[in-house]
Image: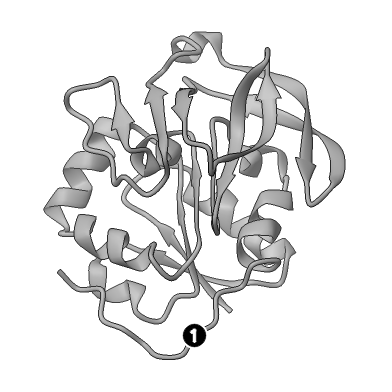
Amino acid sequence: MNIGILSLQGDVEKHGSVLRSLGIDFFFVRYADELIELDGLIIPGGESTTLTHLMKKNKLFQSIQLFAKNKPILGTCAGMIMMSKKSNHRLVTPLGIMDIEVDRNAYGRQVFSFVDDLPVRINGHTEKIKATFIRAPKITQWGKDVEILAEYNKEPCAIKQGMHIALSFHPELNGINIFHKEAFINHKAERKSKPSYAA
């Protein structure tokens, strides 16, 4: 299994460490043609307006949208913003992969970042993890097909829709691998061919 980590900015090395703990091979991805050999993709945290600019510059928008039709994507923090269908910031262009609307930086500035216990329910099992929120977005609207995996203060912060997972927080900073496992091992995509994702 080969998983790509979108490496335009953000905490890419920590995601690599989590994948390594699961025995998953990974590659750092910057261009559309690098998606071809992948079984899944991580869109890490960072700055969503910068991600928008760099993804447009590298012609990744349409390629990732096509990729998402057949392969799982895990988005964390800004990655979740990019996977949404609507953001409250005019300089952010979401990919529209998941049926959610988000409020960017809703938990406050970086100085208000925090770590807290969070119960997560996946596949009928509940596990308590440490969740790190850094300038985290909030999900303000979600569709009926969106499954809520975790809530913070009664608001969804971890969701799943089909094969895709999006999180308001950074599991990789605490070495949490349950979301990577769910996205890429428990729901491994079947690869019948190697389509082109180049725009």
SS at mark 1?
loop
Residue at the spot x=46%, y=68% of the render? 71
**Residue 164 image position (x, y, % from top left):** 52, 54
| Residue at the extreme bottom | 193
**Closer to the camera, 162 or 178?**
162
Q: In this view, does 20 lie above or below 78?
A: below
Residue 30 appears in view: no
Image label count: 1
In this image, 109 relative to 163: left or right? left
Q: Is residue 53 above or below residue 16?
A: above
Q: Mark 1 points at which residue?
A: 191
User: What amino acid type is highlighted by mark number 1?
Assistant: Arg
Residue 11 appears in view: yes
In this image, 6 relative to 189: left or right? left
**Closer to the camera, 98 or 115?**
98
**Residue 11 image position (x, y, % from top left):** 48, 44
**Residue 171 image position (x, y, % from top left):** 65, 40
Looking at the rendered image, the quarter that the N terminus falls into is bottom right
